[in-house]
Amino acid sequence: MKWGVVSFPGSLDDRDALWALRDVLGQDAALLWHKDESLGGAECVVLPGGFSYGDYLRCGAIARFSPIMKSVARFAADGGLVLGICNGFQILCEAHLLPGALTRNRSLAFVCDFVNLRVENAATPFTRAAHQGETLRLPIKHGEGCYVAPEDELRQLEERGQILLRYVDARGEATDAANPNGSMRSIAGVANDRFNVFGLMPHPEHAVEAMLGGVAGRKIFESIAGAAR
Amino acid sequence: MRAKVFVTPRRGILDPQGRAVEGALKSLGFGTIGNVRVGRFITLDIDAPSRAEAESAVRQICERLLANPNIEDFSFEVEVE
């Protein structure tokens, strides 16, 4: 499957995503440049983690106006698969390709940790390699990961099954103590209502090799690769 | 013309920065304060034939980029120099 990973000025996980996809998972992946409009024939576009444009103004607020984001929006409107990781999730929210917004962590502290995530909907192109209710252990590293949306929007997300991942404790319960950033309803990842755009704060690309702490991230990429096949 | 733009966290949205500042002020003995919100203040120069047109442009600028309507409110003042 053909993947394109976008590099924005200030992206820092673009090469890790490329490594995970190409070198670890054997996918056909290439970097895309934010100033280009071509998506290079990618079947899935990845917006990586980092601090695009220094997180100035708001995280993702400036990157969303990069030339390539016009193509990404068109690609998404045509049903193309888009995955936003961390800063990529923030960019997708700013671009209105996903509902809600990501704000400063409740603690005001940057969090760098492993978290447990419960798969809330395994019937999507991004989660189908996992089981419903399965717990995935993935790393997080962010200062602005507190997911916020209006109450009626949250209700709709819930009803339509757009909440794909929630922060949970070791027993799989979405407790307040297991919520690392104060996200409403412990939301760690949401999809759009057509389920072709997905954003998450945790980093699946940092969890694809056992010697680096786990391979749960593979499930996300393998889901997508399976979906497009 | 010169515009001053104020962006603040929308009411009801958790503002941990505001809360931390409020806590610090109270611990300094300013017990009468409350509801501290930390936002952003932006100034910009704008060329426009009239104040009304400048205001309309600044409003668009706020809606498109300076504020995120999901989480922030904005207000602005246009001064004719």
Image: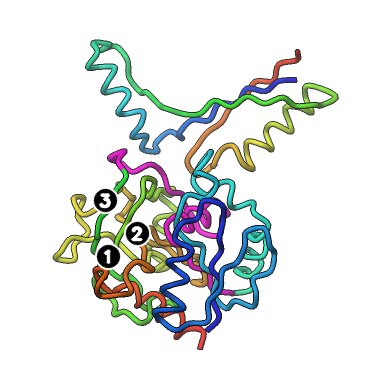
State the separation of the CA atoms marked 1 and 2. Answer: 8 Å
Q: Chain of mark 3?
A: A
Q: Earlier in the sequence, mark 1 or mark 3?
A: 1
Looking at the rendered structure, the kind of residue marked 1 is: Leu
Mark 2 secondary-structure assignment:
strand
Q: Earlier in the sequence, mark 2 or mark 3?
A: 3
Looking at the rendered structure, the kind of residue marked 3 is: Pro
Tag 2 residue: A188
State whether residue A211 is above or below residue A61.
below
State the separation of the CA atoms marked 2 and 3. Answer: 10 Å
Mark 3 secondary-structure assignment:
loop
Give yes or no for residue A152 being in the magenta stretch. Answer: no
In front of the other: A144 or A172? A144
**Residue B36: quadrant of the picture:** top left
- Badge 2 crowding class, 10 Å Cα cut-off, few under 14, some 14 to 19, many 20 or more, is many
Would residue A219 appear left or right of A227 to someone viewing this image?
Answer: left
Tag 3 residue: A180
Looking at the rendered structure, the kind of residue marked 2 is: Ala
Using the image, tell me which numbered label, if any, was put on residue A117: 1
User: Which residue is farthest left?
Assistant: A171
